[in-house]
Amino acid sequence: MAYLRWRRFLELAAIDRPWVGELFMRRGDGPKAAPAKVWDGYYAKGAYDELLESDQRHHHRLLAALVAEAKPHPRILDIGCGEGAFYDSIRALTPARYLGVDLSDLGIERAKQRLAGELKPGVVDFVTGDGARFETDEKFDVIVFPECLEYLGDPEALIAHYAKLLNPGGVLGFTQWLGLKSLRLWRQIKTTTDVLDEAVVSAPWGGAWQVWTCRPR
């Protein structure tokens, strides 16, 4: 318990004191990709089932409200959509278009099964794809990355790639678990974007989520 309290103190301190995070980061910590079979295994074990519970999605609801405020009824690309947890929060805000993308075939299969009554080609779709380099001819008002930034490679390259898929004035949205590693990624994102909103949302079981929206420069 003492260790967890100390770690939480460091993470909160590092939000506006970057040197604290860099001092305690382990060497070699950085963005790491995971193969599709790893994510299939997580979904098979129900590792992310809690994100489908209403009381576990406060950070998703906040992000949904922020992006809908920036652009009502937006065209949304959801990278790392998994079983559709973020869609549960954004659908009440009636997006004009929703496309969910995930590396896991099993995650996408479960999203389609769970939300079968809402699927409509060209309006609400879930597809398998690599979030680090997903390509499409479509343009979007909002692109969100719920809990997946640390697995998508270099943050600056990621921003440059997805900026091409945004409509003029488009917005990027992120959520991630508050930790020293994720704070480093957040700081890297801030060097190539203009932050519109940022918040820390307490989790019911302890700890917290970061939520922010931004525009590529």
Image (cartoon, rainbow, N blue to C red):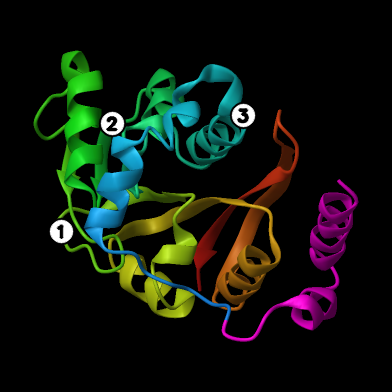
Residue under circle 3? 58
Q: Which marked residue is nearer to the observer: mark 3 or mark 2?
A: 3
Look at label 2 and name its amino acid.
Ala
Q: Secondary structure at mark 1?
A: loop
Q: Residue at x 40, y 31 (%)?
A: 85
Q: Which marked residue is nearer to the observer: mark 1 or mark 2?
A: 1
Look at label 1 and name its amino acid.
Thr
Quadrant of the rendered image containing residue 84:
top left
Q: Residue at x 12, y 35 (%)?
A: 122
Quadrant of the rendered image containing residue 129:
bottom left
Q: Which marked residue is nearer to the observer: mark 1 or mark 3?
A: 3
Which residue range is magenta in the image?
1-28
Q: Which of marks 2 and 1 precedes in the sequence?
A: 2
Category of crowding for the residue at label 1, using alpha-carbon neighbours closer than 10 angstroms: few (below 14), some (14–19), many (at least 20): few
Quadrant of the rendered image containing residue 200:
top right
Q: Secondary structure at mark 2?
A: loop
Of helix, strand and loop, which mostly describes the magenta segment?
A: helix
Residue under circle 1? 136
Q: Which of marks 2 and 3 precedes in the sequence?
A: 3
Q: Nearer the viewer, residue 128 or 39?
A: 39
Q: Is residue 174 left or right of residue 7?
A: left
Residue under circle 2? 96
